[in-house]
Image: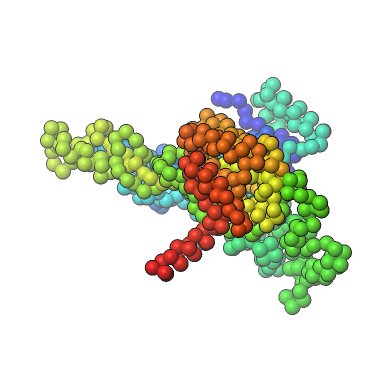
């Protein structure tokens, strides 16, 4: 046996995380917990410790799907089970889903060996079956392909897994406590997927010296004697485990009064969350909290606690919004529910006029003009002006066929997508028709008898599929004085923000280079945290000359380094400039562009020239790079669609 697991009760701090996990253990219908936090904050330790608190599981002996002998699954693939067929007792399982797992590993698949040698559609269970009545833990859930996250969350919400693939049609119970952990610095989940998690908790290392010292003290004690350390905390863990059992039994009897149901609806409406999932999760969490504290009915405090766990991640409507909950707004919403419907609460309108009288701008109304400062010329150092409104970005894709990380941008060979042909040496999943076609010519030599088909291992063909991949999109932004005219730079930053949103939706990595004065700066190394790029962009300074060559050479070095780190991820360089290379000269810039072209870098130049006099320098740069040149206004998908419609109408 391995070393004893770190005890749940020995965790220092992380009160919200501990409570969220315990409430989900009481009521798995909450829908799981997403744990967000920086590295080294004991996220994995807490989750792994939870499984030791869950009640032992009684299962039908030999059932690969962990059926309850008292109420076996009527559609269990290993069934039907007799109502009383004996039972086995085992601890609740902690099943971990690795980042590199395939859909076959998650949901199960056709047993190829038995299918091809015995002619039966035998099903090999996946991790969802193994996690039934236990915990399914997904570390770095934000790095999983979206389609796997969808499958996970669907099963967690419905308590069942449905498999329709490779000639197999299976449905089995898959009720588990889903816990995902992630480091936001490595990229965010899409808001649609965030909403599918019941609760979310932000964790961070304590800044309190005594707390940090106690964390180190306990960890060293555990490492020195895992079994002895676990024994010291065993009574506290047993007490928590018993409280979970008691709360589970009490949960069906907890009453949700109509007044508190109205309070839940009021809170969700006040925070303008989308859909009704938040209301349901909030109700279930409040009921679980009431059962946990031993209450017979839900009260306001239960809803307050539930809202702090269930709503923060549902307020994100934009990938650049930070999750969180305004405490004062929550208290206002809780109080509003106590007021009669025809007596509207006091709102913020009364204070708006006073703010305006004091010279303060209500949120979102300031045009930012006062921030530029007086006396800053075209070559001065000044802050970035407020960006123009974001738009739906035009699709920018790389040429050719890639084989990189799953995503939504460029065409690629993937494990999901449209099947284009069978292959004996590549692809994924069984290509049934291709396998049968390969075996058919050899039936006479193999002594086929009757209606059976003799299939050998060499006949197996796999499906080669074409889908979409994510890319590395590196932005090289000209922040020089010639670009710093307020209207132009506002349009440029608005365009970059729009492209960043597009990159977020297509699961790309992004990087940001700024060049001005005499040098280029790597503002943001390539990362999946697209919101970090938006934050760095807003902090850019503008002014000075245009070191175009330096910007291109810095881009070449960054992309060369990324090829060594992530060879399968193709890169797209997006250069936003007016092309006026006032430092280093245009000839040097064109030589640097030629180096990028020889390295095979796919590039797009965004022409930021404006005014009646156009020099056409961005076009020259695009030719040297071997890429396309598009005008700034052409980055909007709606604008491009409008031009296409106008051309068709004229025709």
Q: Which quadrant of the rendered structure holds the C terminus?
A: bottom left
Q: At x 79% / y 37%, what residue is drawn? A: 207
Looking at the image, residue 226 lies above or below residue 484:
above
Looking at the image, residue 74 lies above or below residue 261:
above
Q: Which quadrant of the rendered structure holds the N terminus?
A: top right
Residue 360 at x, y percent in the picture: 83, 62
Q: At x 74% / y 60%, what residue is drawn? A: 367
Q: Residue lying furthest bottom in this view?
A: 342
Q: At x 65% / y 55%, what residue is drawn? A: 488
Q: Residue lying furthest right in this view?
A: 358
In front: 172, or 627? 627
The answer to whether residue 584 shows anywhere in this view is yes
In front: 334, or 383? 383
The answer to whether residue 507 shows anywhere in this view is no
Residue 238 at x, y percent in the picture: 67, 38
Residue 375 at x, y percent in the picture: 81, 51
Q: Is residue 458 left or right of residue 109?
A: left
Q: At x 38% / y 42%, what residue is drawn? A: 109
Looking at the image, residue 495 lies above or below residue 452:
below
In front: 648, or 347? 648
Q: Residue lying furthest top in this view?
A: 224
Looking at the image, residue 376 lies above or below residue 296:
above
Q: Is residue 607 left or right of residue 69?
A: right
* Display colour scheme: rainbow
Residue 593 at x, y percent in the picture: 53, 37
In front: 407, or 228? 407
The number of numbered discs placed on residues in the rendered structure image is 0
Q: Is residue 98 left or right of residue 230?
A: left
Q: Is residue 565 left or right of residue 399?
A: right
């Amino acid at each position: 046996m391995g070393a004893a697991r770190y005890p749940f009760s020995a965790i220092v701090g992380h009160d919200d995380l501990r409570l969220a996990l315990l409430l989900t253990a009481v009521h798995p219908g909450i829908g799981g917990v997403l744990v967000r936090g920086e590295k080294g904050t004991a996220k994995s330790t807490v989750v792994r410790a939870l499984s030791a608190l869950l009640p032992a599981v009684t299962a039908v002996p030999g059932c690969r799907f962990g059926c309850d002998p008292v109420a076996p699954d009527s559609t269990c693939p290993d069934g039907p089970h007799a109502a009383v067929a004996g039972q086995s007792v085992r601890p609740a399982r902690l099943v971990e889903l690795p980042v590199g797992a395939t859909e076959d590993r998650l949901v199960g698949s056709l047993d190829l060996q038995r299918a091809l040698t015995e002619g039966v559609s035998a099903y090999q269970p996946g991790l969802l079956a193994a996690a039934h009545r236990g915990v399914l833990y997904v570390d770095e859930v934000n790095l999983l392909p979206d389609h796997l996250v969808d499958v996970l969350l669907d099963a967690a919400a419905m308590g069942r897994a449905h498999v329709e693939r490779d000639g197999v049609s299976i449905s089995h119970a898959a009720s588990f406590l889903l816990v995902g952990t992630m480091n936001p610095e490595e990229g965010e989940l899409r808001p649609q997927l965030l909403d599918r998690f019941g609760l979310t908790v932000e964790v961070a290392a304590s800044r309190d010296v005594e707390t940090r010292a106690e964390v180190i003290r306990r960890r060293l004690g555990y490492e020195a004697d895992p079994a002895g350390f676990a024994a010291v905390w065993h009574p506290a863990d047993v007490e928590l485990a018993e409280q979970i059992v008691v709360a589970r039994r009490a949960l069906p009897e907890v009453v949700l009064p109509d007044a508190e149901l109205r309070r839940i609806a009021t809170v969700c409406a006040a925070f303008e969350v989308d859909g009704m999932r938040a209301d349901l999760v909030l109700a279930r969490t409040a009921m679980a909290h009431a059962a946990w504290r031993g209450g017979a009915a839900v009260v306001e405090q239960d809803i307050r606690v539930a809202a702090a766990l269930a709503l923060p991640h549902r307020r994100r409507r934009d990938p650049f919004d930070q999750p969180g909950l305004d405490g004062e707004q929550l208290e206002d919403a809780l109080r509003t529910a106590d007021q009669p419907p025809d007596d509207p609460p006091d709102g913020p309108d009364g204070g708006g006029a006073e703010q305006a009288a004091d010279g303060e701008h209500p949120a979102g109304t300031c045009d930012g003009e006062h921030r530029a400062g007086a006396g800053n010329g075209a070559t001065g150092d000044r802050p970035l002006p407020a960006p123009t409104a974001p738009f739906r970005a035009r699709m920018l894709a790389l040429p050719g066929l890639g084989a990189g990380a799953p995503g939504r941008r460029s065409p690629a060979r993937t494990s999901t997508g449209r099947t284009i042909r069978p292959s004996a040496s590549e692809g994924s999943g069984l290509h049934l028709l291709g396998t049968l076609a390969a075996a058919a010519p050899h039936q006479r030599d193999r002594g086929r008898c009757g209606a059976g088909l003799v299939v050998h291992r060499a006949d197996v063909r796999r499906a080669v599929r074409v889908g979409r991949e994510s890319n590395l999109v590196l932005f090289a932004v000209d922040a020089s004085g010639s670009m710093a005219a307020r209207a132009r730079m506002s349009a440029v930053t608005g365009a970059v923000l729009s492209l960043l949103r597009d990159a977020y939706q297509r699961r790309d990595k992004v990087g940001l280079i700024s060049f001005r004065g005499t040098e280029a700066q790597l503002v943001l190394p390539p990362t999946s945290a697209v919101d970090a790029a938006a934050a760095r962009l807003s902090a850019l300074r503008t002014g000075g000359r245009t070191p175009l060559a330096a910007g291109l050479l810095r881009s070449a070095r960054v992309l060369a380094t990324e090829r060594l780190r992530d060879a399968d991820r193709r890169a797209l360089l997006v250069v936003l400039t007016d092309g006026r290379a006032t430092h280093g000269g245009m000839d040097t810039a064109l030589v640097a562009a030629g180096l990028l072209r020889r390295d095979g870098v796919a590039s797009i130049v965004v022409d930021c020239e404006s005014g009646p006099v156009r020099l056409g320098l961005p076009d020259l740069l695009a030719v040297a790079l071997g890429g396309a040149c598009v005008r700034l206004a052409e980055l909007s998908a709606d604008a491009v669609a409008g031009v296409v419609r106008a051309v068709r109408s004229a025709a």
